[in-house]
Image (cartoon, grey):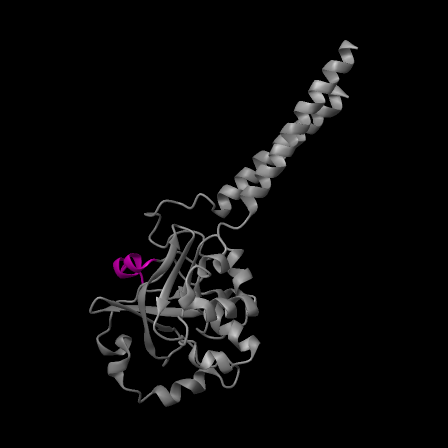
């Protein structure tokens, strides 16, 4: 009877630890945010939010740990609305930067000259510089544009919509950023010809050689801040998840061994 009671107690304790470990493991591997739920709080971005969900870009965003979304308020989707769903997905993916940026960081980070890497670049469909964005700061304003040669720099960062440092930042921009040739209608190279004589004054990059700012570079996956680690690391980063997973798997194995020995 004594042996039976001890076995029951050991089994109960082992089961409790095992269940707790599994639940903890699940919590460390879930997304750090849900962009759809965040944008639902802001009625001015309903159209943009719906389009992210319809094209599946929202799901791709939620699988990341560090991201910046360049959002368009209602009525500013422009020609994106008339595109096919596949093209809409490409364009929207180009509005997702694989790193964390708020307005202050964009204005302050003037150290590097590599373009910002977007979600579209990671898709493998981008050609030439279609998957990158250039950023310039002029007269206190942050302006963005496609990194494709000859593309206009005419989308201004207007404000911060929401942020969860250092996981997700949602910034409002004045107009869509559409890389030449991203719809497959023509190649980026041929798209530069009509822009060769475009007014230089409208593109801050051509006017006064403004400073170009960016994340860690085209090869970066956006899992760490771009300023060399000056920002606190994300508690939900992939590295933390990997370590936690290893520890918990070991714990589960130990509990299982203890359970078998007790049995």
Per the rendered image, the range of residues in magenta is: 102-112
Q: Quadrant of the C terminus?
A: top right
Q: Nearer the viewer, residue 103 or 152?
A: 103
Residue that appears at 36% across and 58% down: 101
The percent position of residue 130, horizontal first and vertical second, equals: 45, 74
Residue 132 horizontal/vertical position (percent): 42, 69
Q: Is residue 262 above or below residue 163?
A: above
Seen at 50% across and 55% down, the residue is 34
Counting from the top left corner in percent of width and height, residue 36 is at: 50, 60
Residue extending furthest right?
1
Residue 117 can be seen in this image:
no
Q: Using the rendered image of the protein, determine whether residue 27 is visible from the camera's viewpoint.
A: yes
Tell me residue 77's x, y (percent): 43, 76
Which of 123/93 is in front?
Answer: 93
Verify whether residue 104 appears in magenta. yes
Total residue callouts: 0
Q: Quadrant of residue 68?
A: bottom left
Quadrant of the frame with the N terminus? top right
Above or below residue 254? Residue 142 is below
| Residue 196 shown in magenta | no
Q: Residue furthest top?
A: 2
């Amino acid at each position: 009877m004594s042996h039976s009671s001890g076995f029951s107690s050991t089994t109960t304790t082992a089961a409790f630890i095992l269940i707790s470990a599994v639940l903890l493991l699940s919590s460390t591997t879930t997304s750090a945010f849900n962009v759809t739920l965040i944008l639902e709080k802001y009625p001015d971005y309903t159209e943009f939010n719906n389009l992210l969900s319809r094209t599946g870009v929202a799901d791709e965003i939620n699988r990341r740990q560090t991201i910046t979304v360049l959002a368009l308020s209602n009525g500013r989707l422009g020609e994106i609305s008339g595109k096919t769903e596949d093209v809409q997905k490409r364009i929207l993916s180009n509005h997702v930067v694989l790193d964390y940026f708020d307005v202050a960081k964009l204005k302050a980070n003037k150290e590097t000259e590599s373009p910002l890497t977007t979600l579209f670049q990671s898709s493998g469909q981008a050609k030439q510089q279609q998957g990158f964005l250039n950023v310039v700061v002029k007269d206190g304003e942050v302006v963005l544009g496609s990194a494709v040669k000859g593309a206009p720099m005419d989308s201004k960062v207007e404000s911060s919509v929401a942020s969860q440092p250092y996981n997700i930042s949602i910034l409002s921009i004045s107009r869509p950023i559409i890389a030449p040739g991203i719809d497959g209608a023509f190649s980026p190279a041929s798209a530069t010809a009509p822009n060769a004589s475009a007014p230089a004054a409208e593109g801050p990059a051509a006017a006064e050689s403004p400073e170009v700012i960016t994340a860690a570079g085209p090869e970066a996956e956006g899992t760490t801040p771009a300023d060399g680690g000056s920002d606190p690391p994300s508690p939900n980063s992939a590295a933390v998840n990997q370590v936690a997973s290893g520890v918990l798997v070991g714990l589960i194995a130990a509990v299982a061994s203890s359970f078998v020995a007790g049995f």
